[in-house]
Image (tube, rainbow, N blue to C red):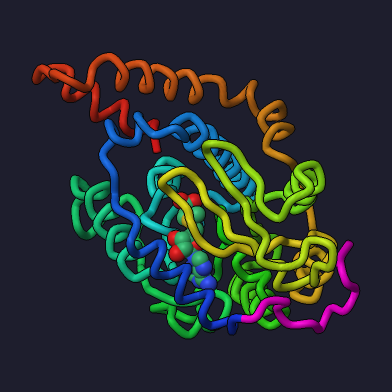
Amino acid sequence: QINQDDEQEGGTQSTSHDNSIVVANHYNKLQEKGLAERFNSKIFYLRNFNNWIKSMLISDYLEKIKDSMQHGSPLRVLDMCCGKGGDLLKWHKGRITYLICTDIAEISIEQCRARYEKITANDPPERKSFQAEFFTADSTRDRLRERYIDPSIELNLVSCQFAFHYCFESPKQAEQMLKNVSECLKIGGYFIGTIPDAKDIMKRQRAAQSDSFGNDVFNIKFLSDPDDLPIFGAKYNFHLDGVVDCPEFLVYFPAFVKLAKRYNLKLIENVRFEDYFQMKIGKGRGLIEKMQAAERFSLNGNRNLSRSNEEEYKHAKDFLL
Ligand code: SAM
């Protein structure tokens, strides 16, 4: 049940800007946790599963791009709403040439840059495995291109993981986000992302017959009337055990597809995680096994590390979020 008025702004009382400040403050405050602490978290396996999905998605599209590219051409990527740089190792392993990282949370950007420096620390300075730039921006309001070191840059891939839904606060913000996606993308380039499934959220809300539902790991509390949702600004508070606690917006997928078309973006695929898992498990079994081995290693081996298994531990960490 979604109103068809597509020009409607957010359906909630607070101004649009307040939400961005709340979201930025929330992510800025999130502490980097050690692996031992993360392992003890209730969502350890969920995070690793999400990380595996992102790894498969990213490697899939990097391969597609490489297959259609002339050998030796540069491969440039925008990681929009990059957070603390959870995908940096994926870009490193994917052998890209250039990465632009941007996020609304300034502290996350600093941590992302530091992580990049660590990953590329052993590369000769003039021949880093990949070059990168970092800046703080609101992708739903700012024009990112103006902030690039080289605004004439042509991108092969734009990635927005677990963040695109923030732009569904208003049509204006969704348009700016999509403009940012498409503006520097080469013809034939790709936009990939992961978002919560609005249909699934609504199914759960109907089943719960309440504005607030969840379990011991997550909770969703509707801040808009679930029986009279606007297309943009359908707001709820999302709480995920120790990681997320901030306002988010439902993405009404047909509106997203329609709006994306205006920016010359054509939908190629839209798959739920459970189906994507089935599609990719053949190719990704090796990575899952490495992750599971790392999980077991963390469980058994991270208390009294000897010098020799310290190296193994560091290696295992690469496969965990
Ligand atoms: N993409 C990263 C990942 O997969 O690890 C981080 C995902 S985190 C769930 C969502 C990120 O979106 C946060 O880092 C947050 O600061 C960022 N974000 C939210 N709204 C944003 C906006 N309007 N512009 C830029 N970044 C935003």
Residue 87 drawn at (x, y percent): 44, 48
> In the image, which residues are magenta?
1-13
In front of the other: 186 or 113 = 113
Give the image quarter of residue 275.
Answer: top right
In percent of the image, x 79 and y 59: which residue is there? 253
In percent of the image, x 43 and y 78: which residue is there? 148
**Prevailing SS of the magenta stretch:** loop
In percent of the image, x 28 and y 58: which residue is there? 111
Give the image quarter of residue 101.
Answer: bottom left
Depicted 196 relative to depicted 309: above or below = below
In front of the other: 306 or 190 = 306
Residue 3 drawn at (x, y percent): 88, 72
Give the image quarter of residue 189.
Answer: bottom right
In front of the other: 199 or 104 = 199
Depicted 268 relative to depicted 263: above or below = above
Screen quadrant of the C terminus? top left
Residue 303 drawn at (x, y percent): 18, 20
Q: Does 306 sit left or right of 275 as displayed? A: left
Residue 98 drawn at (x, y percent): 42, 60
In front of the other: 221 or 55 = 221
In percent of the image, x 68 and y 77: which residue is there? 12
Screen quadrant of the N terminus? bottom right
Depicted 76 relative to depicted 258: above or below = above
